Image (tube, rainbow, N blue to C red):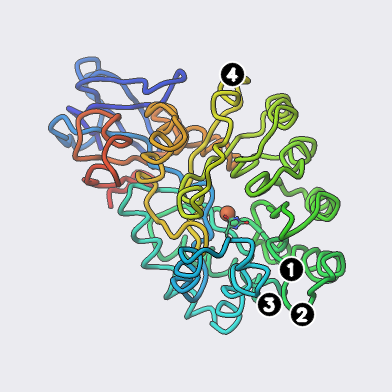
Amino acid sequence: MILGNAMLATMTAGGYGLVERGAVAIAGGRIAWVGAGRDLPAGTPGEHIDLCGRLVTPGLIDCHTHAVFAGSRAREFELRLGGASYEEVARAGGGIVSTVRATRAADEAALLAAALPRVDRMLAGGATTIEIKSGYGLDRETELAMLRVARRIGRERPVSVVTTFLGAHAVPPEFAGQADAYIDEVAIPALAAAHAERLVDAVDGFCEGIAFSPGQIERVFAAAKDLGLPVKLHAEQLSNTGGAALAARHGALSADHLEWLDAAGIAAMAAAGTVAVLLPGAFYTLRETRLPPVAALRAAGVPMAVATDCNPGSSPMESLPLAINMACTLFRLTPEEALAGATVQAARALGLADRGRISPGLRADLAVWEADHPAEIAYRIGGPPLHSRIVGGAPC
Ligand code: DI6
Ligand code: FE
């Protein structure tokens, strides 16, 4: 297949990498050739498709989601609008733990049925790769069920799914006041069991006053290392606990949220090459006022990714184009940085070297937009209409 007459945002060489009247040749599910249409070698095999000047970007990559869960937290949203804080709701037995109750009560078929429409909306926003975390089971069986459902989504829909074990997300009610025992008796054994079933691509945790301490996260990371799994961390979302520096010390792929990140954390992330995953949907939903230190991250050369954090509590959002828009309006990323954040930098945050740019040899994962310039994706609230996606070379 040869896509011609396209405005390409290849996301190579540190920017949009624009190619006007560009062409992309696809063979065997990979990108075979990219360039200006007039330079396409004569005799390149494939059916020509005229994109009539439409924008083509790499398929979007949502590198931080909690897309598998049961239930709704609309009532909690009302409580928070009435004045209760996210932490107060959590300490009163609402918050993450209320989604845990609903998720434990659902079987795998019900979890899948709840997740697929959500995933379909993500795909309608141009995503071709999504990360999905566990973390609403908090017991061995339900954590494994969530990850099985995440894997199943990758078979049910044209999308790559990357799974993350997030057993250290919250302390379940049956372990109230015994976070250490939960980590050692449930989270770490459940991680080993999930890994044995090949359900885990990476390991995450929530390092926060209402969740787990750096010392507890460190034990989970040690278990991940023993299993040969990469780590990442929810860090510095509601307070500064030194989570980002801890993650960097363990060579983490990413540290995520980061509103309370300090200079030491930035320096540690820069030195380790840890990606800063910015989640404006959670900042917006929780009506946070403290901004992640974007200018300092930029100055330090820390790569910045952007994701939805799709979850029922702090970010009920499925649209990566909307996250890109919010990353610009709320966090002051440039549209170029924000699009890179949902493509090339998101690939890096997932440790995937085979996607995120339009470049020969990479997976042919593309998004075609009803737009003629990549700034349209950041500019329009919710993004321009999607024309089509191409996943592993297959149009869908
Ligand atoms: N931080 C978040 O923003 C999500 N998880 C986390 O550790 C929120 C999850 C939820 O509220 O259900
Ligand atoms: Fe999250």
Pointer 3 local density, CA inside 10 Å: few below 14, some 14–19, many at least 20: few
Q: Amino acid at mark 1?
A: Val
Q: Which secondary structure lies at badge 4? A: helix
Task: Give the quarter of the image for residue 257.
Answer: top right
The vertical placement of 69 against 13, above or below, is: below
Cα gap from disc 1 to disc 3, whole angstroms: 16 Å
Where residue 109 sits in the image (x, y, percent)?
A: 48, 80
Find residue 174 and name its label: 2
The residue beneath circle 3 is: 141
Q: Amino acid at mark 2?
A: Glu
Q: Amino acid at mark 3?
A: Glu
In the figure, is residue 175 to the left or right of 36?
A: right
Where residue 352 sits in the image (x, y, percent)?
A: 56, 39
Picture residue at 23% right of the left edge, 20% below the top: 20
In front here: 88 or 113? 88
The residue beneath circle 4 is: 299
Cα gap from disc 1 to disc 4, whole angstroms: 37 Å
The vertical placement of 99 against 23, above or below, is: below
The residue beneath circle 1 is: 171
